[in-house]
Image (cartoon, helix red, strand yellow):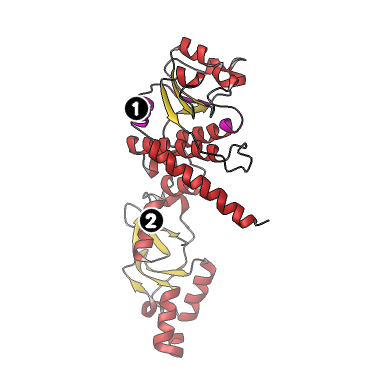
Amino acid sequence: MDYLQNARETLAIEEQALAKLSQNLDRTFDAVVNLVLGCEGRVAVTGVGKSGLIGKKIVASLASTGTPSFFLHPTEAFHGDLGMLKPIDVVILISYSGESDEVNKLIPSLKNFGNKIIALTSNPNSTLGKHADFILDISVEREACPNNLAPTTSALVTLALGDALTVALIHARNFKPIDFAKFHPGGSLGRRLLCRVKDQMQTRLPVVTESTGFTDCLTVMNEGRMGVALVMEQQTLKGIITDGDIRRALTANGAETLHKSAGDLMTRNPKTIHQNEFLSAAESFMKEKKIHSLVVVNDENQVVGLVEFSS
């Protein structure tokens, strides 16, 4: 059996289904986006089986990009979780056939509460389709499963439609990286966008004077473990010595470099950044200038630290 060919056939089927999904979208999608934008409550998403798993991912995407959302398990809803809903909430019901008993049993309660219903289904004439306020078509010609049974293509299409809704809302809300970081403070993006330079800078500084000899400069740089040395005179920054400065000096002067002092080796007027700048700004600046270390200063322009960026 050619498993590689199986994989390619699966991806081809799913690729065609995504293209069809794009072609089938109409202005109902705009209406759904506007409904969610105008929602004063939250978006509740529900479904069972694979649809429920996809629904949870849609919730995660919406919630992390500025649309308050939660997953409502249809079975648990009948045992008290309906209390999580308010009339101002919008509800997305996912059922490929539109005839999932667990999902459709929610409809009378949702109608009674006054919730607007968005159906993700392949059958607009199904029970779910007939009772929904808006229908988004997730129909596929066939599942990638050779038996045309396991939710494969249909699950992917539903997931992709959820992503399309999420991205449309990101555009509509003008949701920026800094907003995303607020909901992901524990990740690397949150660290870069929310942390300030002073939170990450090295305060034990590798300092030499202009008269410090070559060998002693190397010792200070090695002990500092940042590949740099700051050249200071009476608390005033005179320059910086980097690994690159050392290499260039050795290339230009050879063995004579051993007799050079820090004043001979340093780069004058090194780049600095204020301690209250965001770490992301420091990293962008270092990328732009193609440097790996940046001197940090305070309001009095005094050196207070070093921040390092590893590309």
Inspect the image, locate mark 1, and give the three-letter code of the amino acid beneath it: Ala
Q: Residue 282 carries which label?
A: 2
State the residue lying farthest toward the top: 112
| 88 up-or-down from 145: above or below | above
Viewer-closest of 232 and 168: 168
Q: Where is residue 54 in the image (x, y as percent from the top left)?
A: 54, 35
Residue 297: image quadrant is bottom left
- Name the image quarter holding the N terminus: bottom right
Inspect the image, locate mark 2, and give the three-letter code of the amino acid beneath it: Ala
Q: Residues within 10 Å of mark 1 (few under 14, many from 20)?
A: few
Whole-angstrom CA distance, mark 2 to mark 1, is 42 Å
Tag 2, which secondary structure? helix
**Is 41 within the magenta?**
yes
Viewer-closest of 30 and 7: 7
Q: Where is residue 125 in the image (x, y as percent from the top left)?
A: 47, 22
Viewer-closest of 213 and 103: 103
Which comes sooner in the sequence, label 2 or label 1? 1
| 5 up-or-down from 160: above or below | below
Q: Mark 1 points at which residue?
A: 31
Q: Is residue 151 left or right of residue 118?
A: right
Q: Name the residue rendered at 60%, 15% in the picture.
A: 78
State the residue lying farthest toward the right: 1
Q: Which mark is residue 80?
A: none
Residue 237: image quadrant is bottom left
Q: Where is residue 128 in the image (x, y as percent from the top left)?
A: 50, 20
Q: Where is residue 103 in the image (x, y as percent from the top left)?
A: 56, 21
**Magenta residues (range):** 28-52
Q: Name the residue rendered at 55%, 32% in the picture.
A: 56
Q: Name the residue rendered at 60%, 38% in the picture.
A: 148
Tag 1, which secondary structure? helix
